[in-house]
């Protein structure tokens, strides 16, 4: 086994949307960047596939929206809320963003490959698969790089700035001793996929039943992705009771689930995702910065996590570039990213928590009250106002022309 050493301006752990976009923007500005991705490919499922208007607005600003939208995807233009089989209300993305009146459904492997194809054409960008960060390097209190395990042996990256963009289970956060300010767990979303009925269209639906709440999303190219909202700790009990009671729940929930439910013999087709948000107290240390889910993990409520993470990545690109130019990569300098993002992240977390309390309600009283509240909210402008705050940018994010791509 060999031990390699490379020197870079910036080392980014994590090849998800935030890590790739940060690396791509910095490389576009001439910064020497390496992205370390622990997996051996971009294969992702049930993660980050809904790209909200705010994500597309950011791509528009760096002139990549048309490029990304040229890849296989589908558009979600409206949504509806149901109690059992009664339609309580609806909303349209026209009321969220006039500029981009839809969300884009794009499988994450397609998105990540598209970003990588654009980034790898830049001479100062490098991505290494199957490179899992195992250590951070220090000079005194300053982080000076990372050590990753690869199939060929260990790789030491000496870098002026090390970025943790490696998700909610961030190795950089753990190794760097970053502290959590708060963490909330609302429950679990139990995901599965079924064929989309011919008459479904491009509508997402949220449905409350006497059993569980459901989110049903059109999934590219012709499927429905279904999430069952299970209160915290209940999935274990469901599994202990065997597949039959849960199969009957799905059969009663919606006709589109019938074929899937009738064929169930075990729980293997389901994927569990914790509905959790958290906020790291301080995102920066000398020479090191956390971004995206590593710093401010959003719950799946509203499907806004990728958009929030990428917004932070775009702002981080500007802060890191200036810090490198000035030769100051101290914690105080890198904390400007958090200062610029703190207010919005906390606000979105609060909105998600309110929605999750109702969506994951386990008491009969709240489940009875929820349809009444939803019906009232959808008849006012409140729902559209909340959605605009979560799903659309309130204004353009300042992006220097050094990060803008040409047609």
Image (cartoon, rainbow, N blue to C red):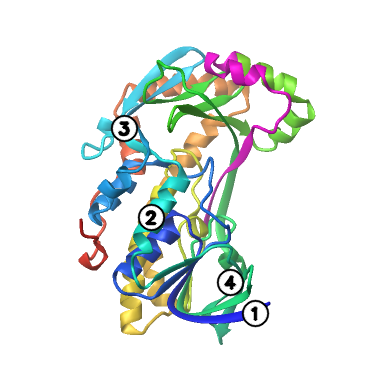
Q: Earlier in the sequence, mark 2 or mark 1?
A: 1
Q: Which mark identifies residue 384?
A: 3
Is 324 within the magenta?
no
Cβ atoms at labels 4 and 1 below 8 Å apart:
no
Find residue 189 and report its horizontal and vertical position in percent: 58, 35
Q: Are marks 2 and 1 in contact (CB under 8 Å)?
A: no
- State which tag comes first along the sequence, 4 or 1: 1
Q: Is residue 365 left or right of residue 331?
A: right
Q: Secondary structure at mark 3?
A: helix
Query: Which sits earlier in the primary sequence, circle 3 or circle 2?
Result: 2
Disc marking residue 115: 2
Comparing labels 3 and 4, the label whose residue is closer to the camera: 4
Q: Which residue is mark 4?
A: 176
Q: Which residues are magenta?
A: 252-279
Distance of label 3 from label 2 (alpha carbons)? 31 Å
Spatial CA span between label 3 and label 1: 56 Å
What SS does tag 1 mark?
Answer: strand
Q: Which residue is mark 1?
A: 2
Which residue is located at x 54 percent, y 16 percent? 254
- Most foreground residue, 403 or 346: 403
């Amino acid at each position: 086994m060999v031990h390699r050493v490379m020197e870079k301006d910036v080392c980014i752990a994590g090849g998800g949307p935030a890590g790739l976009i940060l690396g791509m923007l910095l490389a576009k500005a001439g910064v020497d960047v390496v992205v370390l991705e622990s997996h051996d490919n971009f294969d992702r499922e049930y993660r980050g596939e809904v790209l909200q208007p705010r994500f597309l607005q950011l791509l528009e600003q760096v002139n990549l929206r048309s490029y990304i939208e040229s890849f296989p995807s589908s558009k979600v233009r409206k949504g509806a809320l149901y109690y059992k089989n009664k339609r309580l209300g609806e909303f349209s993305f026209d009321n969220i963003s006039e500029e981009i009146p839809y969300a884009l459904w794009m499988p994450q492997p397609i998105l990540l490959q598209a970003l990588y194809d654009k980034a790898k054409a830049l001479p100062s960008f490098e991505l290494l698969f199957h490179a899992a960060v195992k250590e951070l390097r220090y000079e005194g209190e300053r982080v000076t790089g990372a050590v990753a395990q690869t199939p060929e042996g260990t790789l030491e990256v000496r870098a002026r700035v090390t970025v943790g963009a490696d998700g909610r289970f961030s190795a950089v956060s753990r190794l760097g001793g970053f502290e959590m300010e708060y963490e909330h767990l609302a429950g679990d979303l139990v995901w599965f996929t079924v064929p989309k009925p011919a008459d479904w269209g491009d509508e997402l639906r949220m449905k409350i039943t006497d059993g569980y709440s459901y989110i049903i999303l059109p999934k590219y190219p012709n499927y429905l992705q279904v999430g069952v909202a299970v209160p915290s700790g209940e999935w274990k009990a469901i599994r202990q009771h065997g597949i039959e009671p849960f199969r009957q729940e799905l059969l009663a929930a919606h006709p589109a689930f019938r074929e899937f439910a009738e064929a169930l013999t075990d729980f293997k087709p389901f994927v569990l995702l914790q509905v959790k948000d958290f906020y790291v107290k301080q995102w920066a240390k000398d020479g090191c910065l956390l971004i995206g889910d590593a710093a401010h993990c959003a719950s799946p409520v509203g499907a806004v996590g990728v958009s929030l993470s990428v917004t932070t990545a775009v702002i981080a690109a500007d802060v890191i570039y200036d810090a490198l130019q000035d030769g100051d990569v101290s914690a105080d300098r890198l904390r400007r990213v958090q200062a610029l993002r703190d207010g919005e992240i906390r606000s979105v977390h609060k909105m998600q928590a309110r929605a999750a309390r109702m969506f994951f309600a386990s008491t009969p009283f709240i489940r009875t009250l929820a349809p009444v509240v939803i019906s009232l909210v959808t008849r006012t402008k409140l729902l559209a106002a909340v959605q605009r705050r979560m799903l659309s940018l309130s204004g353009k994010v300042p992006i220097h022309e050094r990060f803008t791509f040409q047609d």
